Image (spheres, rainbow, N blue to C red):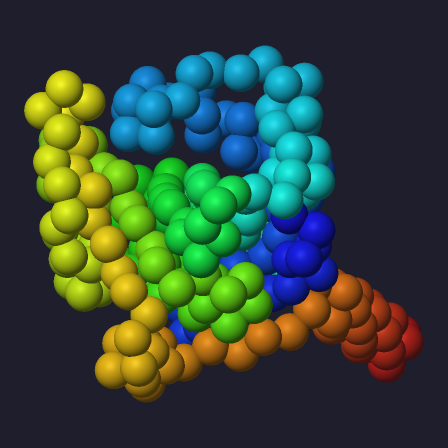
Amino acid sequence: MRINEDTVLRGQRVLLVPYEPHHVPRYHEWMKSEELQKLTASEPLTIEQEYNMQRSWREDSDKCTFIILDALKWEQGCPEEQCMVGDVNLFLTESENPGLAEIEIMIAEPVFRGRGLGEESVCLMLFYGFTALGISTFEAKIGLENVTSIRLFHKLHFQDVSLSQVFQEMTLRWEVTEPERQWLVTSSPVTMTTYKEIQRNVTNSKLGQSRSDVSSDVKSV
């Protein structure tokens, strides 16, 4: 979705950044996992197909995605690709109902699971959905075996809507009422900035470090 191509959402533990071509190799490695393929109902793709998928996420008006970065690692100066932990997505599934979106979350790196990054990422995406995209109803469709995700969405006030034995999945829903809006804003503070700005900050930081190193070398001589 073009609207979020220069948007960054920053919480306390995560940064949500637009899905860029340089993220694709790491993402492709994730999706070789049979566990993630099963949890996300995905088929394995070639690296060329993964690049095509990234372009689709950028261009298509019916879906929106952010890559989840670990904020602590990023602030410590780690390369962006090494800060990647997963992604969070919105699908605008019904053209006749633009206020409805399906939300998905994936924490691909096992070491980052159970640390609250998924919870905060969903909250940031909910905030972006209703403030920037005008979404008023969010749905999550989760496989019955994915107990961890079901528990996560229940914690975030999603209510059970239906259960499909045929597809072995639950549908949960979150409505943007005023009490829920206030709860979200107070429980998960978010700062919105631009991707260009954080990249500029990284560049300036590296330049500052480089100048410091040169100055130290001169002094030592």
| 154 displayed left or right of 111 | left
Q: Residue 91 at what x, y percent from top left?
A: 46, 43
Quadrant in which the C terminus appears? bottom right
Residue 36, image x and y in percent?
A: 34, 28
**Above or below for 42 versus 107:** above
Q: Is residue 201 left or right of residue 142?
A: right
Question: Residue 110 at x, y = what percent?
Answer: 30, 40
Counting every numbered tag in the picture gives 0
- Give residue 124's quadrant in the image: bottom left
Vertical order, 120 against 33 (above or below): below
Q: Is residue 58 something that shows in the picture?
A: yes
Q: Which residue is at a point 53% across and 78% down the rendered structure image?
A: 191
Question: Residue 114, how many percent across, how many down?
Answer: 22, 53
Q: In front: 175, or 66?
A: 175
Q: What residue is shown at x 61% (from left), y 28% (from top)?
A: 53
| Residue found 17% across the figure and 32% down from its top | 169
When asked about the image quadrant of residue 30, the answer is: top left
Name the residue: 26% across, 60% down.
174
The one of 207 and 38 positioned closer to us in this rendering: 38
* Residue sitting nearer the eye, 93 or 104: 93
Q: Is residue 209 left or right of residue 70?
A: right
The answer to whether residue 138 is left or right of residue 134 is: left
> In the rendered view, would you say 112 is above or below 141?
below
- Residue 79 seen anywhere in this rendered image of the structure: no
